Amino acid sequence: MTNREKRLEQTLFASWAIAVVATLGSLYFSEVLMFVPCELCWYQRILMYPLTIHLGIAVVRRDYNQSLYAGVMAVIGAGISTYHYLIQKISTLHELGAACGVIPCTTQYINWFGFVTIPFLALAAFVSIALMQLYIWRNRKDR
């Protein structure tokens, strides 16, 4: 195995690990801490949970071509997370999230250091996964 193949394998594994941690974190917030997810949180989950399975299969098969599909899902998730975070943090946008569902999308269950909220954590995970998938896509063998 060359260094290039090893880096690709490690990057794919790292992106899968991030998806697993994000999935387990969201389950911890909702099932253990009993934070009811808002509608935008559900959309982010709809994109993150399959990434865990998708990237896990890609790791086992060493299928670097799957990075395109995983990357697209991560970019869409990052867009939703960004929108959700902006609704939470910019006061002029609060009205967009007030009628989001049973739980308003402006609800900040956590606010660590004054800026780290649940959508921010999801955004960090989605962006990390997207960047890793871009790296894999650009450096795969059959390019």
Image (tube, grey):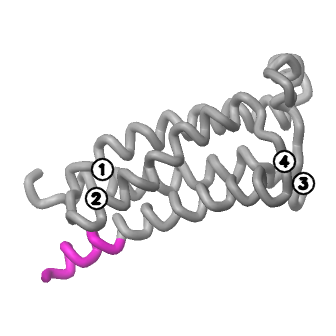
Residue 71 horizontal side relative to residue 22, left or right = left
Q: What element carries label 4?
A: loop
Q: In the image, is residue 14 part of the stretch drawn in magenta?
A: no
Q: Which amino acid does label 2 sit on?
A: Ala
Locate the N terminus and report the quarter of the image it occupies.
bottom left
Point out the frontmost of discs 2 and 4: 4
Is 100 or 68 nearer to us in this picture?
100
Tell me which label, 3 or 2, sits earlier in the chain: 2
* Quadrant of the rendered image containing residue 98: top right
Q: Disc 2 and disc 1: Cα gap in Å?
A: 8 Å
Residue 24 horizontal side relative to residue 111, left or right = left
Q: In the image, is residue 2 part of the stretch drawn in magenta?
A: yes
Q: Which amino acid does label 4 sit on?
A: Phe
Point out the frontmost of discs 2 and 1: 2
Identify the residue position indicated by label 3 in the image.
Answer: 114
Numbered tag placed on residue 35 in the rendering? 4
Q: Looking at the image, which residue sits at the far left?
A: 142
Identify the residue position indicated by label 1 in the image.
Answer: 67
Q: Give the range drawn in magenta.
A: 1-10
Q: Badges 4 and 1: C-beta atoms under 8 Å apart?
A: no
